[in-house]
Image (cartoon, rainbow, N blue to C red):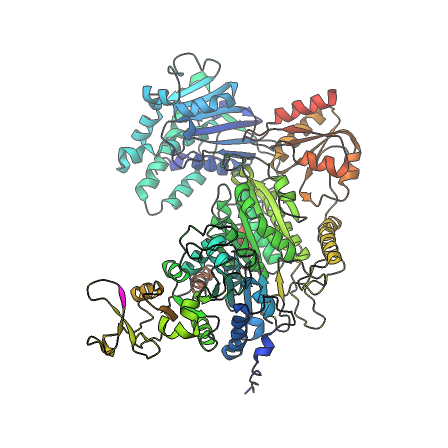
Amino acid sequence: MPRQETLNEESPHSQGRQELGSAVVRFAGDSGDGIQFIGSQFTQSTAMSGNDLATFPDFPAEIRAPAGTTFGVSAFQINFGADVIKTSGDDCDMIVALNPAALKVELPELKKGGFIIADTATFTERNLHKAHFDSNPLEDGTLDAYQVIEFDISKLTMEAVKDFGLNKKGALRCKNMWALGFVYWIYNRDRQPTIDWLKEKFANKADVAGANIAALNAGHALGETAEMPHDILGFSIGKANIQPGEYRTVTGAEALTWGLVTGAKLVDLKLTFCSYPITPASSILHYLSNLMEYDVVTFQAEDEIAAICSAIGASYAGTLGVTSSSGPGIALKGEAMGLAINTELPLVIINSQRAGPSTGMPTKTEQSDLFQAVFGRNADSPLVVLATRSPSDCFDVAIEAVRLATRYMTPVIVLTDGYISNAAEPWLIPDVEDYEQTPVKFRTKPEGFKPFLRDEVTLARPWAIPGTPGLEHRIGGLEKDSETGHISYDAENHQRMTNVRAAKINGIANDLPAQKVEDGAEEGQLAVVGWGSTYGPINRAVSTLREEGLDVSHIHLRHIWPLPKNLGQLLGGFKKILVPEMNNGQLVTLLRSQYLVNAQGLNKVSGQPFKIAEIETAIRERLEK
Amino acid sequence: MNVVTPPEKLTPKDFATDQEVRWCPGCGDYAILKAMQRTLPEIGVSKENIVFVSGIGCAARFPYYMDTYGFHTIHGRAPAFATGIKLANPDLDVWVVTGDGDALSIGGNHLLHVLRRNVNLQILLFNNEIYGLTKGQYSPTSRAGTRSPSTPYGSIENPVSATALALGAGARFVARSVDTMQAHLPEVFKRAHEHNGASFVEIFQNCIVYNDGVFGEFTARDVADDSQVILEHGKPLIFGKEKNLGLRVKPDLFEMEVVTIGKDGISEKDILVHDETNRGLADMLARMEPPSLPVAIGVIFCHPTPSYEDGVKGHMNEAKKHGDGKDINALLRRGHTWTITD
C-alpha cells in the first residue's frame, strides 16, 4: 500500500480549502459502473467525518441495460453538511458523470455554476450518439454555465492499476474507485474506511483489492498534487452538531428488518417471514434470511398469495407471521388479508410502495397505496395501517406494527416506499433494553374457552394455538358466532361481528400517542400534513419558512388507520391545511372525509421525491391566497 | 422412576364434533369422514397436535367435523397455509383436505409447490370430477364432453390426472383410494401419515347430486374386481374376479397390457411385481384407465427423502453456531459503527 503512510498528512492544498455548510453530490454512470457502491462508500466516510447526511439511490429497473444508454444510467445522490440534513437535497453542487449518458440524464439536476467531473475517454462519437448528443458537450459550449473538471479517468486508472496484472476490462472496472478517490480529495474525506472495506470484501482476491485501492489512492493523489482547473483547492465541511452516541448508517430495508426481529423478541415470539421476490421489497427477505440464529425462519413462497397465506398459517400456529411486497403483490394478497381479519390473527404486511399502477416504474418511488392499504379489500374489512417516514424510523414502526398486531389480534400494514428502503442515513443506535417488553400470552386454560370471546379492553380474541390440549377448535373465513366461533348465518350476529371488527380497530386509537406537531405552533394559518417519505422535504421547508416568520406548522402521521384520536381537533386549529403527497390525493381525501376539513393537496407523481423548493413554493402560495 | 400412565385410547367418537354435518345425504364425503375418524385413534397422535386445513368447496367443510384443530381457509390456498403451520411448528400433524377444483384449478400452483418442496404433511384430494358447491359446473378432472350448467354442449377441455400431476411435481408418496372402500381407506391414511414428507392421496368420491356414478365403470360392485388393481408392494399386479388377470409390459412396446394367467403360456412369473420405489412404474400405473386397463388403487409410489422441515432445521442448527440470537444490541451494532462524543 504505497500511499497508506501519507493518509493522515495534511494535503498541500488543505490550507486553501473553502468552508461549506453543506453540499449535494450526485454520482452517475452506467448501471454496471459500480455507482451505488461508491455512493455507499462515500456515505460511510462522510458519516464518520461527523457530517449529517441523507442519500438517494436512483437506479434503473434493468440489471445491466445496454452500456452507454440513457435508460441504463444509475445514480446516487448524497446531501451532507454541518447542519441537520433532512433530505437528499434539491439541486446538486456536483455531478460525477462516468459517461455521456450520465451527463445527459443528470445535467438538469445540477445548479448553475455547479461542478461536473467527467471522464473524457468515454466521450467517443459512439457514446455521444447513444446519449443523444449531436456534438461533444465538453467542447461545444453546452457546459459554459458550469465548472467542468475533465480527466481521462480511464487512462489514469489503467496506469494506476498496471502492476496488478488485471486485464483491460478488469482494470477499467476500478474507474469508479479513481473517481471516488478524487471526490474524497475534493471534500476532504478519509479513504481508510473504504480501503478497509475493500480489503475485507476482496480478502481472497488480493489483486482486485490492490488494484481498487491503487485507483482510489491515485484519484486522491491527483487532487493533492495536480494543478486544478478553476483554482479549486477543495472544500471542507464542518462537523454537524450531532447527539453523542454510537452511530451507524442504515437503510430503510435494514432498519425494518432489525425492527421486525426486535419487535418479535419484545413480544417473545419467533418470526416466520414469508415473501415472494419483488422490487423494491426483496432486500428485506435477503436480510432476514441471514438472521436465522435470531429465531427467524424465512420462506420464499411460490407466489404473493402463498406468501401471505403461509404467513397467516405461521401466525395461526403461534409464531409471528410477516409478509412483504410492493403494490402489485399487495393487490394479490387482498383476499388472504380478509381471512386474517375474519379469523382475527396477528400478521404484519409490509408494502414497499413503488410507482404504479400495474407494474408501473418498479425502481421509482411513490406513495400511492394508501387507499389500497386502508380500503383495498372486499367487504367491511378494517385493519391497522402505519407509515414510515425515514430509513431509521422503519425500526420503531416495525416494532409498533408487531406490538399492535399481537395485542389486538389483527393484520397491520406497514407502508414504506422504494426511496426509504434504499436511502441511507446515520442512525443513533438505540439500546433495545429501553423498549417495553409485551410478551404474548397464548390461551392455555380450557375452562370457559370460547374462540371469539373477547378481551373487554382490547376487544381481541384469545390466541389459542394448535398443540394446546383441550382448546381444539375450528376457525375459518365463514362468518362465525360472536362467541363460540361456530359458523353462523344469523343476521343480527353478522351485524354484531361487523361492528365489533370495526370497533376493535377504531379502539386502537386509544392506545396511540397523541398526534404531535413536528415543527411550529399547535394552531395557526397553515398546517402542512404529511405521511411517509415526504417527511424530510416538508420538515426542511417548514423550518426555513418559519425562520422567515411565516405562520406554518408541520404535522406528520405515523398512524394512518386508525388516525390519532386528537387529529381532528388539532387540524381544526388551522385556517388552512396543505397535504403534499407523491400520489394524486389520497391522504387529503381521507382527512377531508374523516374530519370535513378544507384540506388541499400538493401532488407529485414523477417517481422522484419532492424537492424542498417545491413545498416552499406551495406553502407561500397557500399563505398568500 | 416416573410411572407414565398410558394415554387412554381414543375412539372414533372422540374425533367427532357437535356440528351438524351439512353434506348432501348420500355424499361420498360422509364415508371419508367416517374412515378418518376411525383411523386417527389407531394412529395415536394426540388430538391437540392434529390440524386439518382446507380451502373452499364441499370437501373443505371437513375440518368443522373433526374435533381437532381446524382451519377452513380460502379457495385453493390450503397447501400454503399448511406450509406456514409446519414452518411455525414442525411437530404438528397436518392434514390438508381439498377437492379437484380447489387443488387442481384455482390452487394448482400451490399443489405443485407443496409437493415439490416435500413439506411433511398429508394431502387428501377428494376427486368427484365436478364443482359441487357452486352447483355442478365441470371441473379440471371432468372428462371431455361433460355436460354441465357452464358447458351445455359438453366440455371441450381434456382432464388432468391428479395422480400423474402429483408424480410430475415430484411427490414422494402418491396413493389412491375410493370413498366406499372402508377397509382400504384407513390403511392408505396410515401409510400417508407414516411417510416423512408430502403425502398425496387421491380419493375417488361420488357426488350424488351433480355427478352420480361417474366412477361407476370401475367402482360398481359388478365391475370393480375386473377394473381395479389393488397395489401391494412386492406382490404381483394380479386382479380380477377369478384372480387370473395380470399386468405386464408389452414385449415390443413400453406400454402396460392385461394378460390372463394360464392362457397363451402366461404364468404368474410373467406378471409385473409392484415396487413402490420405482418411479417409471408409478408413472405407468398412474396413467392406467378403463376400459383397456384397470385403475390402480393403493400406494402407487413411496420413496422418502428428507422433508422441507428437515432442511430448515439443518439450516437453523447451522445458523445457531454463529450465536444464540439473544443479543439484539449486538445485532444492531454488527458491521461498521462510530461514536460521536461531546
Q: Which image quarter: residue A485?
A: bottom right
A277 over B250 or under it: above or below: above
The quadrant of the image that shows the C terminus of chain A is top right
Viewed as shown, does residue A360 lie left or right of B174? right
Q: Position of residue A515 (x, y in %)?
A: 73, 41
Viewed as shown, does residue A515 lie left or right of A330? right
Magenta stretch prevailing secondary structure: loop
**Count of labels in the image:** 0
A51 over A443 or under it: above or below: above
Whether residue A300 is visible here, answered yes or no, is: no
Q: Position of residue A330 (x, y in %)?
A: 55, 45
Q: Nearer the viewer, residue B66 or A315?
A: B66
Viewed as shown, does residue A86 lie left or right of A546? left
The quadrant of the image that shows the N terminus of chain A is top left
Q: Residue at x 53, y 57 (%)?
A: B136
Whether residue A353 is visible here, answered yes or no, is: yes
Residue B255 is one of the magenta-drawn residues? yes
Q: Residue at x 40, y 37 (%)?
A: A63
Q: Position of residue A466 (x, y in %)?
A: 58, 67
Q: Nearer the viewer, residue B211 or A26?
A: B211
Q: Residue at x 73, y 37 (%)?
A: A593
Residue A350 is one of the magenta-drawn residues? no
Q: Nearer the viewer, residue A575 or A479?
A: A479
Q: Nearer the viewer, residue A227 or A338?
A: A338
Q: Which image quarter: residue A595?
A: top right
Magenta segment range?
B253-257
A329 over B30 or under it: above or below: above
Q: Position of residue A96 (x, y in %)?
A: 44, 26
